[in-house]
Amino acid sequence: MTWGRGTTALVCRHALRCGCLPTLVAAALALVGHHWVPLPIDAAPTSAGAATAWLQLPLCVAAAWCTFVALRMWPPFAARQPGSDVVVRQQGSALHGCAAALLGSCIAQAVLMLPVVLVLPAALGAPAAVRAHVAVPLPPTPVLHAGSPPLVARLPDLTIDAIVLRPLAGMPDGPLLASRVAASVDGEPVATAAEFREPHQVAHLPLPPARRHELTLRLDSGNVPLLFPPGAVEVVGAATHALATNGLLLLPLALLPGWLALALASLVGTAAALPTQTALVGVVLFVTTVGGLGPYDDAVRDLLRGRWLATAGVFPASASSLGLGGLAMILAMLVRRRCPR
Amino acid sequence: VTPGAWRLAGATVCCLGAMWCTPPTPARIEEAVSWLVRPALLPFAWQALELAQRSGDGGEAFGRAQQILRLLPTWTDGHVVFAYRFALDGGAAATGVDRVAAAWQRLQVALAWLEHARADAGRREVELLQAMALLPEVATAQQPGLAELLRPHGGAIAWADRYLAAAERLTDSKAVREQRTFLAPWLCAGLLASGARERAIAVLDTAITRAADVRDRALAVEWSTRLDEVRRALRGEPVDLTAVRADTRFQRLLPHLR
């Protein structure tokens, strides 16, 4: 089977032909929407993180278009499709060509999304200098209150130049006295102390750039109990990365929803007809993109906030989606082998 | 002629009739689209706001709040609480002059936001103006350095007077000035719902000061005593809240008082 006439190439070409214009229109709409329909008050220069919807729009359109094109174009994705028997007889593969069609759809999505992830984040105001923000794992009871022991944590192997604290504050144990947290890194106290009185307060503690190994947080004074949930303590990497490179890192994560939807469709398609399959793919795409299930939504947000995706934890978080899709394809192979058309 | 064609013709006539009765304007079309998409967008918008507060910066949370309020332009409570939260946010600004300059900028932005919200406030415009009148005083009390920056503009009192004068023109009543202290439970409840305890205490401080404007002295003393009890409870001091609990004006605050 050659590239030009194989299933992958056929689906890819067709998806590109069908998806190019809608993606282009969606990208233009996103640009126009962001710049011509601004928020009533444009206050802070760091609000690019609030523009995730505009970046998601063309990415979701490209993913949806290519996925639905593959679903409708390749008959074995759904039961009782006209032409399915012919295709199944001619295809020697265990998935009756669904894997190749899925690959074609993913290549088409990648081609359509590439200019979007390279150009649009900068146009939406994402910071040009991308920095690594790595969450510091804390002890099992990450609480600071009067009399509690200091929190000691190992720092990631990274040259850092700041620590960010955003604890949750509880009710004070008496007349309100702001809790003052003293941080020390490798035994050396950090010059700036942080004070917390209520939730959602953030403290940035700058450090001279260096590799550090251990962070200690101690309550110096105050009676506001502080809880540090996962992600409440972050270190900021000293190195900066290019926004375009960060956009490229988003690409595989943006392909994940479409890949998962078609992988599940290849399993369910052994019994379900096209309308059911269309609904299934639509639901999977919706919950994994707009719905925020999986790493895609977080990755888009981190990209626009100027956080380096390679260290943001979004790649490990994609393991469950990859595992689910892989399992669906393995099961699809087994089911299709047991029930030949 | 088939029945389908008659139905189509009937629907077309109805549509044209509706358009003739209520000609579509860009504002009406925007409102209709907003009405249609609101149920689908709001849950995600709230989720995004929570995430911005938990892991984003002040600018992002501000942007998300504006997105929600664009979907709900007539929600005056929301405008006021979000603007107060933004204006009184200590943020991650540096100390000293930078901090005061940042507070000054936030105050201007918050007042501009509330000014923008006046167009959709309807019959609650007076309350909105009263809240705007209180904000410069609360901000100055929270960030004393602001007073210097406000002085060339007449100070916080002059700013408040401007908004109160507008409210007086709307109501044709001089009582507006003394009523603003009674907004405190409403403002505090909104701030406390988002965990902004310190900012709620700052609002109470100013409201207690403004209670002196109330001409009925007995009412003024009683009101400032109740506000002080709430303030002490929020500060974690031991205080008897029986009178506050019995007062229906504080009903919205009760879930936040222990």
Image (tube, helix red, strand yellow):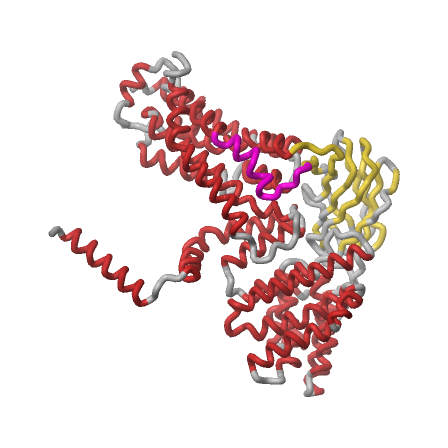
Which residue is pictured at 36% across the width and 34% down the height? A277
Q: Residue furthest right?
A: A188
Place residue A93 in its image quadrant: top left
Residue B21, above or below B35: below
Residue A218 in the image, given as x and y percentages of width and height? 82, 46
Which residue is pictured at 82% across the width and 56% down the height? B96
Residue A142 in the image, given as x and y percentages of width and height? 73, 44
Residue B131 in the image, given as x and y percentages of width and height? 63, 71
The image shows a total of numbered marks equal to 0
Residue B117, above or below A211: below
Give the prevailing secondary structure in the magenta stretch.
Answer: helix
- Is A78 left, or right, of B252 in this rendering? left
Q: Is residue B117 magenta?
A: no
Q: Is residue B213 visible?
A: yes
Q: Residue furthest top?
A: A1
Magenta segment: A112-129
Q: Is residue A285 visible?
A: no
- Is A211 left, or right, of B65 in this rendering? right
Quarter of the image that includes the C terminus of chain B: bottom right
Residue sitting nearer the eye, A201 or B16? B16
Which residue is pictured at 42% across the width and 21% down the height? A99
Place residue A158 in its image quadrant: top right
Residue sitting nearer the eye, A203 or B129? B129
Residue sitting nearer the eye, A298 or A57? A57
Residue sitting nearer the eye, A137 or A278? A278
Residue A139 in the image, given as x and y percentages of width and height? 74, 39
